[in-house]
Image (tube, rainbow, N blue to C red):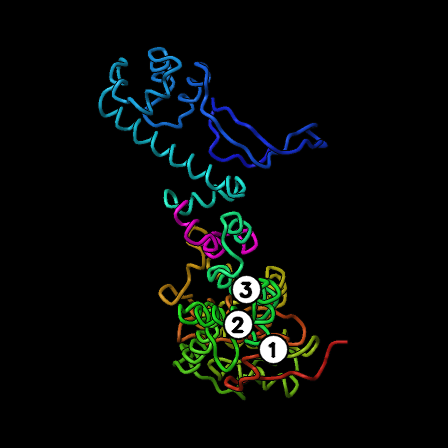
Amino acid sequence: VGPMPGVHVGENISCKGKWKHHAKFGPQFEVESFETEAPTDVVGIQRYLESGMIKGIGPAYAERIVKKFGIETLNVIDCKPAKLLTVPGIGEKRVEIIVRCWEEQRLIRNVMIFLRGHGVSPSFAQKIFKKYGDESIEKMRENPYRIAQEIRGVGFKSADRIAQNLGIEKDAPQRIQSGIQHVLWELAGNGHVCFPKDALVEECEKILEVSHDRVLVEIHALQEQGEIVEEEGVIWIKPLFLAEVGIARELSRIKNAPCAMREVKTDKALQWVQEKLRIHLAAQQREGVASAVTEKLMILTGGPGTGKSTITNAILRICEKLTKKILLAAPTGRAAKRMSEITYRKAFTIHSILEMDFAKGGFKRSRENPLNCELLIIDEASMIDTHLMYSLLKAIPSHTRVIFVGDIDQLPSVGPGNVLRDVIDSDTLPVVRLTEIFRQ
């Protein structure tokens, strides 16, 4: 058992690993590494050719070829393919297909042997070949650290292990540069969008076991390459820097664009909605509703029991009279379900409204394919990280009114950044802070 890419019926394989006992299936041999050899007997050769590995040879042709050449079959295909023309039914076009496929399989085999010979596991070897094809050996010799950035599921530590097997020194520029980016992404995983340069250098020294000066040299090199950004002694990995700048730009775009919804007289709207819902709104709650129906983009923040749900329902009741294009969303399925229960309207996850594109990665909704809404209310907005916020804002049409609802002291984002708190602290958007608690 275990990943064994590139193995075909009829081949001889030599495996290394260990025996284990499976509770359901009993004794199993877990393969850690393996080597393949071409079959050496007539039965094995025929099965090998029948496996479908080589286009142009199916079971019928495999039988004829083996009957004609016997134990020399593979040698004929490899060195004297013209002899295949003597086999009944095989013409020049089929020989061309067989020769081309045979060369492709030889290439795959050579790549796999090279990668496994340098400590690459079978599963990683398959990923590397899928990404780089016949350039795999050249790419790995040139810079094995590229796989940490370019192949999903392969991290810096795996790439570093492979690089050491290839004889790359600890203080090699490509190793230090890849290590710096690895450290920045690890810090991002802990919530840091950027990091002080001095602290970053110390962290890299420890992890990479290289000198302070060598880290500084490669930080400068990465800046020159446009991979990282430094401003005022703080360093960003480029995608997160672009996301932060993008968030500021998109918020400004939405805030300053005309609103698709018509204006309302707030005093009359407040009186009407309180009568309709049979409630009495406190001063802060009235401020929240008034701001939401007049401002293009605003934030409503407060702790548990401060009336965020009541205000959201009041906003919805007023806005339902102004537009049918209303969209409710939250960062998680649980938060979206709770929003639906409170508002009696269907709420979605942010990922759902942005429509994940599993083939290309990212989202289908964007500036070019925006959301179809005139009012968007986002609940639990404190949970939105930098990447998701940027993706969301890009997909919001300029004419849409946007309301962010959340508690900045309760639920932080899982990914890098504390976007809602940072936007509030920037004093660039209208914010209504709810402090009076109504629920015990």
Three-letter code for the amino acid on which mark 1 is drawn: Ile
Disc 3/disc 1 C-alpha distance (Å): 39 Å
Q: Earlier in the sequence, mark 2 or mark 3?
A: 3
Residue at 60% x, 32% y is: 16
Most prominent secondary structure in the magenta stretch? Answer: helix
**Neighbour tally class for label 2: few under 14, some 14-19, many 20 plus, Cα within 10 Å:** few
Q: Which residue is mark 3?
A: 185
Q: Which residue is mark 2?
A: 213
- Report whether 17 appears left or right of 350: right
- Residue 148 is a magenta residue: yes
Kindly tell me whether residue 326 is visible in this rendering: no
Disc 2/disc 3 C-alpha distance (Å): 21 Å
**Marks 2 and 1 in Cβ contact (< 8 Å):** no
Nearest to the eye among marks 2 and 1: give it: 2
Q: Where are the magenta residues, as a range?
A: 137-158
Residue 271, image x and y in percent?
58, 85
- Report whether 64 appears left or right of 181: left
Q: Which of 323 and 250 lies nearest the eye of the viewer?
A: 250
Per the image, label 1 sits on a secondary structure element best described as: helix
Residue 328, image x and y in percent?
53, 67
**Numbered-mark total:** 3
Three-letter code for the amino acid on which mark 2 is drawn: Asp
Three-letter code for the amino acid on which mark 3 is drawn: Trp
Q: Which residue is mark 1?
A: 311
* Whether residue 74 is situated above or below residue 261 in the rendered picture: above
Residue 134 disc label = none
Residue 309, image x and y in percent?
63, 73
Q: Earlier in the sequence, mark 3 or mark 1?
A: 3
Q: Quadrant of the C terminus?
A: bottom right
